[in-house]
Image (cartoon, rainbow, N blue to C red):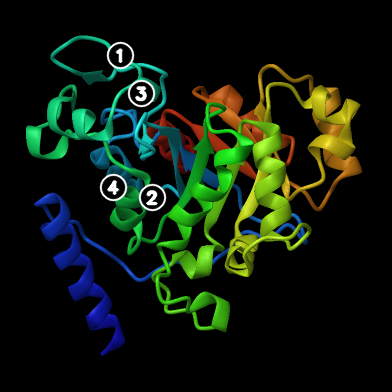
Amino acid sequence: MFKSAISSFCVTALVGLFGFTFDCEEPQQATLSSEAPLKKVFVVAHRGDEQVYPENSMDAFLGGSKAGADFVEMDVRRTRDGSFVIHHDENTGRSVHCPQGEVAIATTTFSYLRNECRYLNLPVDRGMVLTLAETLSLMRWTRTGLVLDVKPVIKEHEILEFAEELLRLDPQGHCARGIDLGGTFNCFSNLIIYVNDLNAHNKLWRVAKGLQPADPRFRVLSAMKYLKITYEAKTALAAPEAWLDNDGLAFNLMASSVEDIQRMRALYPHKIFAVWTLSQASEFALAKSLNMDGIITSLLHDYIKYEKTK
């Protein structure tokens, strides 16, 4: 009976919010853990299934889930009027068309983005720029986790407003009472987050872990996996107290030396290490040989084929 209720809610929600349906499944049980090395490499579809669909669009996220990604990654920015939206670049233009030409996300309103701008190569009814809340609702009943790449324009003084947006996944506060109905990504444990502004990331981590005074409601966000993000592994090795104090690290595989990666893996065997953004079979093979926990790829289907032909 509970399974039927989930399925019914999922179809109704997607039809009501976006005007189309998607095959939803029961929520996935969380498999991430920072307590022990992961046995299976988790696969992240970079900006959704951008190999087939426009990046960061609803089709890309649902497509990534349907293709079998463990997680879909999305980029979070903020508009002038305070809305958290999903968009990678500072400006529209490359992936999103607006009639007045290129506009800056930070200096425009969400109303303008929603009503005037559309992703290229998608039908009008599915080509809108999404808010973070809409995307979380869209993915809520799939079996796919989310990687939230919070862009550096979101600063320390704004990060608790971002946290409030996440808490809207659980408006009744079930998670704080130990009740997991499954629809909140297993009470946030199936979310990975990296906030590019280091001060903002640290504040969110401290608040979630109860390491600084804050509204106790934020404590449920401690279930997320907090990965700091840097370009090279050697940056983290040079200052581990600043970069390896959370659950792990996301870094550019090809910008990092094999020696640095091996050393970091040996020194921190219980951390989660994810590498980006992979696009070739040789990179997939290297990441696995180095015992990386997660692979972030812009070519999801190529990775799936690689795994099948190994």
What residue would you read off at disc 2? 68
- Kindly report the distance in space between the C-alpha atoms of the residues bearing marks 2 and 1: 27 Å
Where residue 128 sits: x, y (%)?
A: 19, 35
Mark closer to the chain start, 4 or 2: 4
Q: Is residue 268 above or below residue 117?
A: below
**Any mark on residue 105, and which?**
3
- Kindly report the distance in space between the C-alpha atoms of the residues bearing marks 3 and 4: 24 Å
Where residue 102 sits: x, y (%)?
A: 27, 11
Are the residues at dot 1 and dot 4 in contact (C-beta closer than 8 Å)?
A: no
**Any mark on residue 62, and which?**
4
Are the residues at dot 3 and dot 2 in contact (C-beta closer than 8 Å)?
A: no
Furthest residue toward bottom: 1
Amino acid at pointer 1: Arg
- Kindly report the distance in space between the C-alpha atoms of the residues bearing marks 3 and 2: 31 Å
Q: In the rendered image, which quarter contains the N terminus?
A: bottom left
Mark closer to the chain start, 1 or 4: 4
**Any mark on residue 298, and which?**
none
Are the residues at dot 3 and dot 4 in contact (C-beta closer than 8 Å)?
A: no
Where residue 26 sits: x, y (%)?
A: 35, 71
**Any mark on residue 94, and which?**
1
Residue 293, image quadrant:
top right
Mark closer to the chain start, 3 or 4: 4
Mark closer to the chain start, 3 or 1: 1
Horizontally, residue 160 falls left or right of residue 33, namely: left
- Kindly report the distance in space between the C-alpha atoms of the residues bearing marks 3 and 1: 13 Å
Residue at image point 9% right, 52% down: 19
Are the residues at dot 3 and dot 1 in contact (C-beta closer than 8 Å)?
A: no
- Kindly report the distance in space between the C-alpha atoms of the residues bearing marks 1 and 4: 21 Å
Mark closer to the chain start, 2 or 1: 2
Horizontally, residue 96 falls left or right of residue 278, namely: left
Callout 3 crowding tier (Cα within 10 Å): few <14, some 14–19, many ≥20: many
Q: Nearer the viewer, residue 25 or 170?
A: 170
